[in-house]
Amino acid sequence: MEILRHTGMRIEELRELGHHSIISYKLPTTGEVIPLLQIAPSKTDQERLLLVSPELADVLSAVISRVRGHDGRVPSIPSYDLHEKVWNPPTPLLYQWPIGGENRTISITTIRQSLNTLLADTGITDAHGQPLTFQPHDFRRIFITDAILNGLPPHIAQVIAGHDHIGTTMGYADPRELHQMGEKSQVASSGRRPDGLQRYYELAL
């Protein structure tokens, strides 16, 4: 849930996230090393890089710690591409777990069910008193809306989200379209800081 919320990535991109997806970039002007998250091409066949915030770094660290084997490495496993209908070569995917004596990728169905199981356990309801239910794509809407409401230029949000058209991005950036959020938007509670958004903007340029 936290990785979806802090990246706005699609569910198929989440399942393809690997240990090798975390890279670093050294700024030529200051020499500062910036951690980046490489998102593999998916729906739009466009690879993109996201700045890793401290909050996202903590979550990625926790995921890697859980999936590491006894040798300290993230196991490389094959995965099936549902869209291309082909098997991908073994890679150190972050979303894997042991089943029947071997590690396999976590399915889309399991991810969807886990999100709503977690929400049900919290007892949180929407503005009408109904239990919240989320789809992974809802966090993409929240991410984009949150970013634009906090000052990120829409054309930069378009690049970060991997949209081909700015109209698609602006269609996401409407609190009224958030899934079952009711009349009162909750996106402002994410804690993303304006200076972090500014760094997105500077790196994108």
Image: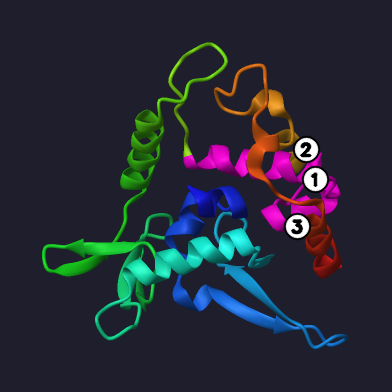
Most foreground residue, 142 or 165: 142
- Residue 133 screen position, x and y as percent: 44, 28
User: Which residue is rendered at x = 47% and y = 33% of the image?
Assistant: 134
Residue count near mark 1 (Cα–Cα under 10 Å), binned few <14, some 14–19, many ≥20: some
Q: What residue type is labelled 3?
A: Val
- Mark 2 or mark 3, which has the lower sequence index? 3
Residue of label 2: 170
- Which quarter of the picture shows residue 34? bottom right
Mainly helix, strand or loop, the magenta region? helix
Q: Does the magenta stretch include residue 153?
A: yes
Question: 174 left or right of 56?
Answer: right
Residue of label 1: 166
Taking 67 as reference, is 9 above or below it? above
Residue of label 3: 159
| View extreme (left): residue | 100
Q: Does the magenta stretch include residue 164?
A: yes
Taking 90 as reference, is 165 above or below it? above
- Which quarter of the picture shows residue 77? bottom left
Q: Which amino acid does label 2 sit on?
A: Met
| View extreme (top): residue | 128
- Residue 185 screen position, x and y as percent: 67, 26
Q: Residue 104, labelled with which disc?
A: none
Span highlighted in magenta in the image: 136-165
Question: 90 left or right of 199?
Answer: left
Q: Quadrant of the C terminus?
A: bottom right
Residue count near mark 3 (Cα–Cα under 10 Å), binned few <14, some 14–19, many ≥20: some
Answer whether labels 1 and 2 touch (C-beta < 8 Å).
Answer: yes
